[in-house]
Image (tube, coloured by chain):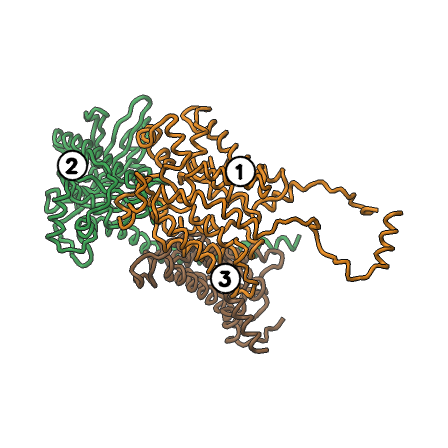
Chain colours: A orange, B green, C brown
């Protein structure tokens, strides 16, 4: 009865007041721009810390990456006749994440090439903003890894000593390059790892704070966790994807990672490599991850399992990049498998 | 019914036609194909010995193929060699059976021509016959002894070992003192840009000129190659300088490829094992041949 | 069904408007698998050209004798025969090239483009037209392979036809199999774009 009344009211009301649009109808203060810039802000502390770990050139590489991503975004949107949306921060975020997953000793030309591939081919030719099915930053990294395998697997730097942030400027990278903890563990075994990086509580704490060789932004686990926690607090992301990824990596490494079953070191698996960065900032990308809760958990478990599989059995020491890239196109499939329950019955519809 | 019969007849006729066409082509091309396969192998061998491009091979150089088999009986295992007796008129092979301690079990003449010996099937049958009933023969490898007017100048050894991904198939040449003459990577599936660099000159040439003492304990070092040595490895400097630098870096371990330590290590270990095992075996074989006074061609 | 195109039109048709790789999107596996250099493209293109022409002509000659119920097996038999012949001849005459791509030559048996042309064209048309159609399709395939091979060789190993033009390897990515998909996809988009542009400018 009430409904009828409403519709009668509608009929009598002036047409202008009613604006018909598609869902969602709930309004809030959030917008794409705000979310993107918040994520960018959350990534600032690890970036600043990386300067004190690997030297000033990380800032330079990141700047090149961000600028080229934004430039490529603008050019490709112009060329394809789309609306230019560089102000929404998504290109800045891609550039930042791209710089975070490359080694600190590479030439600054590499991020430019990766930006072209990631933004133009990976994002705009595969659908454009909101429709791309691969995470552009990781696609850029995969492209670099395939194109410059030597630089991307050997340009690691040891953390600088006594805050000498300019110490790597002007030196030949070949002479100072080292190996990442995961690579040492994989290629030379646990004994060499202990010899190179030490053991015990000091090892975990220095790894967790970020003082270890690795990609520019992946090392400082503490600051990445704090950033992720802020995103959780603001409800920009939920705990499902990061929780299931990190949980699966820890569990599977504990079971299969050691010399005997149940002999692996789950904590070490989380603080080495890019697990935390990938779980909080890469896998939770809105466009390329599933939307329903169950499929998010399945997605996270699959990423974690693939990561451990690549780390333990694959050809590369770190596998989270490929694990996320492999699961990205499956996220829509997962969504259609785990559809939320429909409240309206299929026949007749709501009365 | 009639349909089926026509179908059968037409299919049969077309199959026969096809078979005729293929057969005729096969007859016309088989000789050339066989020749090509052998020529390719020959070319790799000659290049390893230093006869590259236009440098003609002198007539005094000849190659003698030794085939090694593993002969397993019910509870014993021994090594059987097919050793050539000579080129031309008295060509044929000796079958030499040596137990694992280096003692001769028996030897006899095997009448199989040099041409036929290249055909694996014919060779296997002849070998099984020579070994006698109750023994199983398995082909192990093939070594080529290169002689220059009767005296040995090099051995060519083939080998296969595990690389980073799948097997790496190599051929290498050592001189009678087991000093490396050259290395050629025949087949591999390493990652392009990383492990695949093992087929580059600057990696392969590092093995050249390493004496047996160094090869026995050779390992890789994770250091960049010094610039002057790199130039020599890539043959960018004069012949004398190459020789000078080669002897200067003679006792140096192999410089690993950047980003591909495992592949580099696989090759250096593989080469080390091949040469070490061969040196051991050929000494035993030589002793046996000398004791028995078998007239072999090398 | 009589064919109303001239022999020249048939050839051009195969190269441009019905290019097997870029327009029909058939036989993509070799296009991504082996097109890492121009020379590979040329070699496989020649092999496909011969097989296509010979099979088209053979089927066209015997089109009235082929029983309709077993025509697909007959096509396969014909293609397999010619592939074996080409395989043997290549092994005898061009051993170096054969060592590199022998496995792909044997794969020609399964190329969709050849069977498709036999079914669509050769089994209905005259011998002469089938010859020109086969030639056009073979050339079209070769052109496609050469274009892809050129892009991948230049970007992947910095060379053209084996001659070093850049002096360094710019982007190793392009000689990996995955880049084959990217290059084919980008090329398709490029040719579609040219066609659109051409149609638009014509009005």
Q: Image quadrant of residue B120?
A: top left
Front residue of C43/A15: it is A15
Chain to which the residue tagged by mark 3 belongs = A
Bin the neighbour count of mark 1 within 10 Å (Cα to Cα): few under 14, some 14-19, many 20 and up.
some
Q: Which mark is residue A74?
A: 3
Please tell me if label 3 and label 2 are on a single chain.
Answer: no
Left or right: residue C123 compared with residue A184: right
Give the CA distance from mark 1 to mark 3. Answer: 32 Å
Please identify, in this view, whether the residue under mark 2 or under mark 1 is nearer the observer.
1
Pointer 1 residue: A229
| Picture residue at 60% right of the left edge, 46% below the top | A332
Q: Secondary structure at mark 2?
A: helix
Chain to which the residue tagged by mark 1 belongs = A
Q: Image quadrant of residue A53?
A: top left
Bin the neighbour count of mark 3 within 10 Å (Cα to Cα): few under 14, some 14-19, many 20 and up.
many
Give the CA distance from mark 3 to mark 2. Answer: 63 Å
Give the CA distance from mark 2 to mark 1. Answer: 62 Å
**Figure check: A326 above or below C42:** above
Q: Secondary structure at mark 1?
A: helix
Left or right: residue B56 compared with residue A222: left
Most distant residue in the right direction: A1
Front residue of B12/B34: it is B34
Chain to which the residue tagged by mark 2 belongs = B
Bin the neighbour count of mark 2 within 10 Å (Cα to Cα): few under 14, some 14-19, many 20 and up.
some
Q: Secondary structure at mark 3?
A: helix
Pointer 2 residue: B212
Q: Does the rendering let one see residue B189?
A: no
| Picture residue at 34% right of the left edge, 52% below the top | A107
State the image coordinates of residue B36 (x, y, percent, origin top left). 30, 54
């Amino acid at each position: 009865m009430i409904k009828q009344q409403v519709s009668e009211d509608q009929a009598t009301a002036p047409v202008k007041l009613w604006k018909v649009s598609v869902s969602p109808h709930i309004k809030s203060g959030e917008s794409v721009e705000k979310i993107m810039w918040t994520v960018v802000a959350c990534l600032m502390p690890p970036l600043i810390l990386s300067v004190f770990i690997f030297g000033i050139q990380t800032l330079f590489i990141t700047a090149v990456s961000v600028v080229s991503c934004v430039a490529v975004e603008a050019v490709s949107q112009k060329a394809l006749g789309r609306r230019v949306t560089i102000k929404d921060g998504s290109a800045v975020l891609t550039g930042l994440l791209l710089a975070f997953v490359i080694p600190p000793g590479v030439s600054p030309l590499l991020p430019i090439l990766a930006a072209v591939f990631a933004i133009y081919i990976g994002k705009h030719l595969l659908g454009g903003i909101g429709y791309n099915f691969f995470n552009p930053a990781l696609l850029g990294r995969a492209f670099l890894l395939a194109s410059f395998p030597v630089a991307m697997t050997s340009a690691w730097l040891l953390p600088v000593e006594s805050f000498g942030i300019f110490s790597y400027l002007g030196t030949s990278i070949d002479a100072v390059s080292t190996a990442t903890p995961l690579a040492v563990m994989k290629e030379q075994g646990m004994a060499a790892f202990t010899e190179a990086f030490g053991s015990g509580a000091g090892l975990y704490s220095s790894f967790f704070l970020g003082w270890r060789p690795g990609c520019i932004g992946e090392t400082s686990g503490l600051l990445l966790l704090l950033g992720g926690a802020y995103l959780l607090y603001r409800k920009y992301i939920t705990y499902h994807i990061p929780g299931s990824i990190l949980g699966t990596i820890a569990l599977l490494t504990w079971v299969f990672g050691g010399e005997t079953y149940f002999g692996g070191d789950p904590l070490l698996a989380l603080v080495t490599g890019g697990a935390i960065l990938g779980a909080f900032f890469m896998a939770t990308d809105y466009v390329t991850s599933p939307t329903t809760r169950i499929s998010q958990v399945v997605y996270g478990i699959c990423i974690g399992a693939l990561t451990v599989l690549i780390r333990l059995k694959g050809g590369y020491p770190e596998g989270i990049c490929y694990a996320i890239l492999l699961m990205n196109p499956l996220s829509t499939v997962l969504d259609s498998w785990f559809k939320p329950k429909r409240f309206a019955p299929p026949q007749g519809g709501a009365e | 019914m009639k349909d089926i019969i026509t179908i059968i007849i037409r299919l049969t006729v077309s199959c026969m036609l096809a078979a005729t066409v293929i057969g005729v082509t096969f007859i016309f091309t088989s000789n050339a194909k066989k020749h090509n396969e052998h020529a390719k192998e020959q070319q790799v061998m000659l290049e390893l010995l230093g006869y590259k491009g236009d440098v003609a091979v002198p007539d005094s150089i000849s190659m003698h193929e030794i085939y090694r088999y593993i002969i397993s009986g019910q509870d014993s295992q021994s090594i059987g060699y097919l050793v050539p007796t000579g080129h031309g008129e008295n060509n044929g092979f000796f079958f030499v059976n040596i137990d694992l301690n280096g003692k001769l079990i028996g030897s006899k003449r095997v009448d199989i021509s040099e041409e036929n010996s290249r055909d694996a099937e014919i060779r296997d049958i002849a070998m099984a016959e020579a070994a006698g009933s109750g023994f199983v023969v398995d082909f192990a490898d093939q070594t080529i002894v290169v002689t220059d007017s009767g005296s040995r100048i090099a051995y060519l050894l083939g080998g296969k070992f595990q690389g980073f991904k799948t097997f790496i198939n190599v051929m290498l040449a050592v001189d009678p003192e087991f000093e490396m003459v050259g290395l050629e990577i025949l087949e591999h599936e390493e990652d392009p840009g990383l492990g695949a660099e093992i087929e580059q000159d600057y990696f392969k040439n590092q093995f050249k000129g390493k004496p047996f003492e160094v090869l026995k304990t050779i390992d890789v070092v994770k250091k960049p190659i010094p610039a002057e040595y790199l130039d020599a490895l890539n043959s960018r400097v004069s012949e004398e300088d190459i020789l000078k630098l080669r002897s200067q870096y003679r006792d140096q371990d192999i410089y690993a490829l950047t980003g591909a330590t495992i592949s580099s290590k696989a090759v250096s270990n593989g080469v080390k094992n091949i040469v070490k095992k061969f040196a051991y075996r050929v000494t035993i074989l030589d002793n046996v041949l000398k004791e028995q006074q078998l007239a072999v061609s090398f | 069904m009589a064919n109303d195109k001239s022999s020249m039109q048939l050839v051009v048709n195969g190269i441009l408007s019905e290019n097997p790789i870029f327009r029909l999107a058939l036989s993509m596996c070799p296009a991504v698998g082996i097109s890492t250099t121009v020379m590979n493209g040329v070699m496989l293109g020649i092999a496909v050209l011969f097989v296509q022409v010979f099979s088209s002509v053979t089927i066209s000659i015997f089109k009235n004798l082929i029983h309709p119920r077993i025509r697909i097996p007959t096509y396969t038999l014909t293609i397999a025969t010619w592939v074996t012949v080409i395989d043997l001849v290549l092994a005898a005459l061009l051993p170096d090239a054969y060592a590199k791509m022998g496995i792909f030559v044997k794969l020609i048996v399964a190329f969709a483009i050849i069977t498709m042309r036999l079914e669509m064209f050769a089994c209905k048309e005259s011998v002469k037209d089938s010859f020109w159609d086969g030639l056009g399709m073979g050339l079209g395939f070769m052109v496609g392979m050469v274009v892809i091979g050129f892009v991948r060789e230049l970007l992947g190993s910095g060379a053209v036809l084996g001659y070093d033009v850049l002096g360094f390897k710019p982007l190793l990515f392009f000689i990996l199999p995955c880049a084959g998909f990217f290059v084919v996809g980008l090329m398709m988009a490029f040719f579609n774009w040219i066609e659109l542009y051409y149609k638009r400018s014509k009005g």
